[in-house]
Image: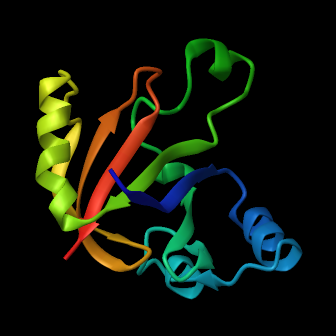
Amino acid sequence: MKAVLDHIVLAVLDMDAMLAFYCGVVGLPAERVDAYRDGSALFPFVRLGESTIIDLFPREMWAKGLEGSAEQQRAGRFPNLNHFCLAVDAAEWEPLLARFAAAGVAIDSGPMRLSGARGEALAIYVADPEGNKLEVRFYD
């Protein structure tokens, strides 16, 4: 199977610090910052290239259950990576779903239409054997 990294999602506590780092220090262009600040977008992102972005999820966007283990919470640490996403060709979609089913991999959510680095796509979420959240999508 051939796939490319579409985006990663970072759980962010201090949005201004993260934007300053990724835009000011690293030098990546930010998108949707004004829309995020005025409430018309749920989160901003920074662009790595034409087809890859880093979503910056504010704390209120963190999915229930991804706030970290009890040990991490007591230590004041939370996972920074919410999930990562692979984009596949449309021809790969059905065979991949069949392989997930054959392996007993449950689809946690989806299929659903979501926005990504190249616009709208059909996506699902699954967990890998270590519990990492993986989004897989294809663009029409």
Q: State which quarter of the image contains the C terminus.
A: bottom left
Q: Nearer the viewer, residue 43 or 38?
A: 43
| Coordinates of residue 20 in the picture (x, y in percent) | 81, 72
Position of residue 54 in the picture relative to residue 122 (left or right)? right
Residue 15 drawn above or below residue 106: below
Question: Which residue is situated farthest in the top direction here?
Answer: 71
Position of residue 67 in the picture relative to residue 131 (left or right)? right
State the residue at coordinates (49%, 51%).
60
State the residue at coordinates (68%, 51%).
13
Residue 108 drawn above or below residue 123: above
Question: Which residue is situated farthest in the front direction here?
Answer: 1
| Coordinates of residue 40 in the picture (x, y in percent) | 41, 81
| Coordinates of residue 78 in the picture (x, y in percent) | 64, 32
Q: Nearer the viewer, residue 57 or 121?
A: 121
State the residue at coordinates (66%, 20%).
72
Position of residue 62 in the picture relative to residue 2 (left or right)? right
| Coordinates of residue 48 in the picture (x, y in percent) | 63, 74
For the image, the number of numbered tags is: 0
Q: How is the image coloured?
A: rainbow
Position of residue 13 in the picture relative to residue 59 (left or right)? right
State the residue at coordinates (53%, 71%).
52
Quadrant in which residue 91 is drawn: bottom left
Question: Which residue is situated farthest in the right direction here?
Answer: 25
Q: Nearer the viewer, residue 18 or 85?
A: 85
